[in-house]
Amino acid sequence: MPVLFESQPPSGKKTPIPKKIPVRYNSTPLTAFVIHPKDIRFETQGLDEEVILFLRQHVIVLLPKLAIGIFFFIAPLIVFPFVLQFLSTPIEIPPGYVIVGTMFWYIALFGFVFTQFLQWYFNIFIVTNWRIIDIDFLYLLYKKFGEAKLTRVQDISYRSSGIMATMFNYGDVLIQTAAEVPNLIFESVPRPNEVVDVISDLTKMKGRRGGREY
């Protein structure tokens, strides 16, 4: 897993970013967008590698899952009794079975909600001064790590569609590379236009300086 909120990285001269984008140094456990974070490191980070941009999906993507969780939370209290009163069955269910069944229902519901939160929390995107990293948390004990060097980036764009995406300013950032992973997609990240500006600026700087392979 990425090691988040560790000790601060060594101080030094920071890699410049586009001037039109405000710098955001501080982060919280629920941060979804931060530039030049002071307190974020990850497990494969090099000694001279600097985190320029840290991203998660916009927190708004959790709302549909939260709504599902709320519905299934109140279902045993309101929906099920309402449905059962219209159903006739010759078998009377013992109260103990109802209690045990309700307990298993809420345990399963908690597992679903907790898993959805973990997937959001650990699915992160990182841009450093050398590479672009996509860490996908798929299962409790399994993750997928993809990366591309900034010197291998061929094209970068973003798409944002729908009322919610427009209102809350989030979208998908698409990165085409010449690396082993030909395409990286930052899904539903905040401020996709700023993400594109930062990565484009970094790739141009690497091109002018003849960036090294990391």
Image (spheres, rainbow, N blue to C red):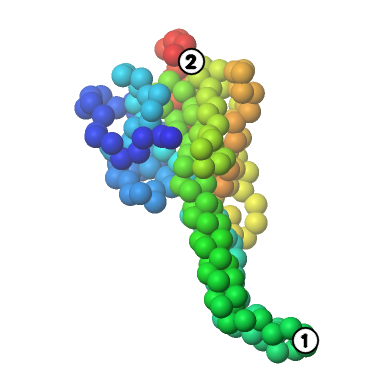
Q: Residue at x 31, y 19 (%)?
A: 47
Name the quadrant containing residue 46: top left
Under tag 2, what secondary structure? helix
Residue 147 pos. (x, y %): 52, 25
Report the amino acid beneath label 1. Answer: Pro
Label pair 2/1, CB-CB below 8 angstroms? no
For disc 2, the marked residue is: 207
Name the one closer to the observer, 37 or 156: 37
Name the one closer to the observer, 187 or 6: 6
Q: Is residue 195 visible?
A: no
Residue 210 pos. (x, y %): 45, 10
Residue 1 pos. (x, y %): 43, 35
How packed mark 1 is, by other alpha carbons closer than 10 Å (few <14, some 14-19, many 20 or more), is: few
Q: Residue at x 35, y 49 (%)?
A: 29
Q: CA distance from mark 2 to mark 1?
A: 77 Å
Can you name the residue that lies furthest to the left here?
11
Disc number for residue 90: 1
